[in-house]
Amino acid sequence: MDKRFFGKAISLLLVLTMCFGFGCAKKDDTRTIAGYALEQNDGANAQMYPYIVRTPHATWYLAAADIELLGEEAFFEGLEKLLTYQEADFADAYAVLDGYLMDEIPVIDVHTDFAAQTERAKWNKAGAYYLGPDMGIYLYRNWGVAGYALLHEYTHYLTYECCTFDLTEGGGFWAEAIAEYVSMISCQNRMGRAVNFGMSDEEQAYAEQRKLLDADGTLDPKKYYCFMAAFIRSGAAVGITYSAVSETPITMSERLLEHPMQTTISYYEAASFFNWLVERYGRDLVFANMTIGQEGFPEVFGEDFETLFFKWAADNDAWCIENGIVLGPLEE
């Protein structure tokens, strides 16, 4: 397997009269993007975010520096791709969490920050981040990364703030596993598909060779995640540094391969393992115990974490093979 594939996952003075290719957004002359009105922002953050778009479940704050960075046409084309599918993707997440959500889901703020104007964007390597109900979600890098990450971050919002179950605070296995499970395993993630999850041409070709694409030639997120989990478990990732669910960089070693821990596994493994737990033990049991540490697995699931993890790994390999995914060496 090609290890390179694993290595993947301006200031601006605001001119209020600036016009975009589709026309100025005046108070008496709004334009629409994917059916939503582009409005001038009259709030305290208007200098950084002169325009907003309101959808039923999100208020988008559009940074002037990002429009300049990408260019007007590319910026609004990328925005439209996500807005076209946002509400359908959010509805999918609600369906996965049905029975555990509050009656009303408050609107969440979403900010673009591709030009890295905020301090977090300058040092944070993530493509997006949920910063709590008051600050909302910040999207970094570009539209490809934003499309990949937005549903994950929105799931953080739902599971931390809008669900009836308890969830380990501050990140970690359960928080990241359920966010990946919802966004990459259970849902279509139309926003991610609309930008093909930000894949380069080289990555697209590799995914095609591994049979990770759907019928439309777009990356299938569940196949991709299960393949990447199998790739790591095969030992091919030994020596590679990756971001663990504890949000810390970890270098895969033989010891970690032989003795996986709840805090050191990758996002790919966490998503597929979480899905396996739900299928094996039921959603209610899993959702009711998303605060336990590794030592709590025997009492809740009847076996220790390591034993269950290796059982999942074997079943994950089998699932990949059954679904036509190529796990072994590629033909030249």
Image: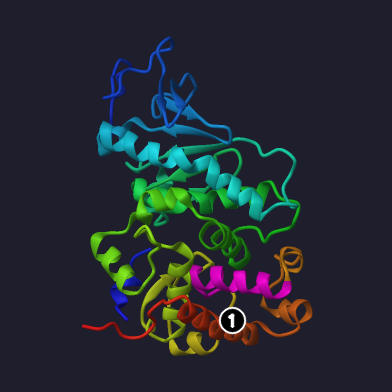
Give the side of residue 44 with respect to residue 133, left or right: left
SS at badge 1: helix
Q: Is residue 278 magenta?
A: yes
- Give the extent of the magenta segment: 263-281
Dot 1 amino acid type: Trp
Residue furthest right in the image? 299
Q: Residue at 76% of width from left, 83% of height from top?
A: 302
Image: 96 above or below 117: below
Residue tagged by mark 1?
A: 312
Q: Picture coordinates of residue 243 (x, y %)?
A: 44, 68
Q: Picture coordinates of residue 247 (x, y %)?
A: 50, 64
Give the side of residue 285 with respect to residue 173, left or right: right
For the residue pair 324 and 305, the one nearer the viewer reads as 324
For the residue pair 246 and 71, the one nearer the viewer reads as 71
User: Which quarter of the figure is the N terminus placed in?
Assistant: bottom left
Is residue 134 visible to the viewer in this orientation of the structure?
Answer: yes
Q: Residue at 54% of width from left, 61% of height from top?
A: 180
User: What secondary structure characterizes most of the magenta part?
Assistant: helix
Image: 18 above or below 323: above
Q: Residue at 33% of width from left, 69% of height from top?
A: 207
